[in-house]
Image: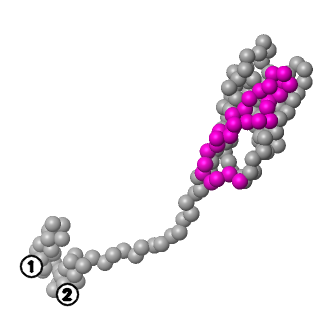
Amino acid sequence: MDKLDNLKKLKSLLESNVITESEYSKMKEEILNPSTPDVVSKKTEVPKKEGVMTVSFAGQFALIDMKVHLYINEQFHSTQSYRKGFSVKVPLTVDKLQVEVKNISITGTNSTIYEFEDFEQGRDYLLELSFDALSSRFHKDFNLS
């Protein structure tokens, strides 16, 4: 319907001698056969979806709350609560991940290191930790899902 309206207006302009016959022909052709605009092709990379490793500890009852220090790839990440537990999300931006969990208590500091490689791109992982009260350290065994 838009084309028809435009043609009527164009014809009116011709009959009113506002435009010439050649201008009318040219504009009529443009209305009936519009030229398609040049399409600029630009390749853009779609950003890769990063995965996330969630390091989780449910917490454990203790009379005195120990502090738990998390280190990600040998860099200090955060301090967490042994009694309350924690859930920390770590973006997977590299192929290797080292999670070190240090529990700091009155009797000293114990450390457990977990190492992971070859993550699937865009996949999220859950690392569930457990604690051995007898040895006062986090288990080397863990649940990764």
Would residue 5 be counted in the magenta stretch?
A: no
- Quadrant for residue 81, please give it: top right
What stretch of residues is rendered in magenta? 118-145
* Spot occupied by residue 115 in the image (x, y as percentages of width and height): 78, 45
**Residue underneath mark 2:** 22
User: Which of the marked residues, 2 or 1, is nearer the chain's N terminus?
Assistant: 1
29 vs 85: above or below: below
Please give left or right for residue 119 compared with residue 37 in the image: right
* Spot occupied by residue 52 in the image (x, y as percentages of width and height): 64, 44
The secondary structure type at the circle numbered 1 is helix
Q: Is residue 15 visible?
A: yes
Front residue (pair 144, 119): 144
Within 10 Å of disc 1 (Cα), the crowding (few <14, some 14-19, many 20+) is: few
Instruction: Report the residue at 61% width, 48% height from top.
Output: 123
Q: Is residue 23 visible?
A: no
Name the magenta segment's main secondary structure: loop
Please give left or right for residue 112 compared with residue 95 in the image: right
- Quadrant for residue 130, please give it: top right
Determine which of the numbered discs, if any, sits on residue 15 in the image: 1
- Tell me the kind of residue under disc 1: Glu
